Amino acid sequence: MHASYTKYLRMNRIPHMWCPGCGIGIIVKAMIRAFEAVDWSSDDLSLISGIGCTSRAPGYLDMHTLHTTHGRALSFATGVKFARPDKHVVVISGDGDATAIGGNHLIHACRRNIDITLIIVNNYIYGMTGGQYSPTTPVGAKAATTPWGNVDIPFNVTELAKGAGATYVARGHIASGVQLERLIRGGLNHNGFAVIEVLSNCHTQFGRRNRLADPIDLIDSISKSTVNIRQAAKMNKEELDGKNVVGLLHRDEDRMEYCEAYEQIIERAQNAQKNRGRR
């Protein structure tokens, strides 16, 4: 769909600092189209990030923004949502920022089911901070801290989010911007904690160490590793080995949102106080 990108951008901050060919630009455009599709005003929207390449996005988007400390974006976002539950809160984070130093905040945000949309840009590595391996780096992949290949089993981010209690979980990738926009839009419309993992490329740090230095080659590799959820339902375990299932993977609309549940507690406490005052 056509979108008025400049309406949501701080044009005086352009050009951006991302490497040519970086997938974050595709993701930011999908986000903007999703914001426009749900008709959210910049005045009612807060975008929050931690540290890393992905986390520079709030600097370019014209809305209420916070660029916070490493791994703590969800903590700040929880405070914003608690203070202003009538506002829309979105967090954008990298795989290291969200699942390593921010991993504890991630599982508890999922558990609480607070109405925040989290977009995790998974490029399998720490991009800005030196090319170290992250909790999503594939086994055998090289990084600055695993020059002979990673031996750690990587997180499955979407399964982690589902297991921790997130009520909207999806995965997309940068080679399919239309699907990505749709998945983000679904997360924005969901009343609860939404996690959208986006498989993206970092050819500068991940690609050049793993014979995929050309961004097109790396994006093509990501695309070939994915399979749509409808197609995956017809495949057996062996056929799915090494594949990333993309699409809407989980949605639970029955659980109460955290701020709403807390408001009920406040109301009960206030009523109890009034009743004690009448005795």
Image (tube, grey):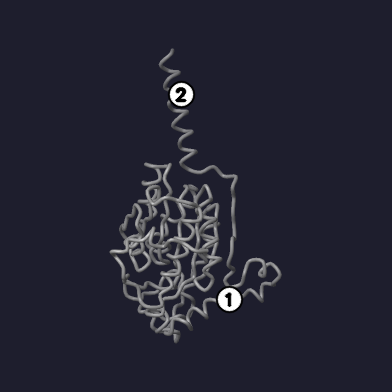
Sort mark 1 into few (<14), some (14-19) or many (20+) by Cα contacts within 10 Å: few
Percent position (x, y) of residue 108?
45, 51
Left or right, residue 65 beside residue 190: left
Left or right, residue 55 beside residue 248: left
Residue located beneath label 2 in the image: 271
The relative height of residue 276 versus residue 15 in the rendered view (above or below) is: above
Percent position (x, y) of residue 49?
36, 59
Residue drawn 58% across and 67% down? 246
The relative height of residue 74 versus residue 244 in the rendered view (above or below) is: above
Residue located beneath label 1 in the image: 242
Work out whether residue 158 or residue 14 is closer to the camera in this orientation and state it: 14
Residue drawn 36% across and 73% down? 127
Extreme-right residue of the structure: 234
Percent position (x, y) of residue 187?
52, 55
Q: Which mark is residue 14?
A: none
Res 228 → quadrant:
bottom right
Q: SS at mark 1?
A: loop
Percent position (x, y) of residue 150?
44, 78
Residue drawn 45% across and 18% down? 275
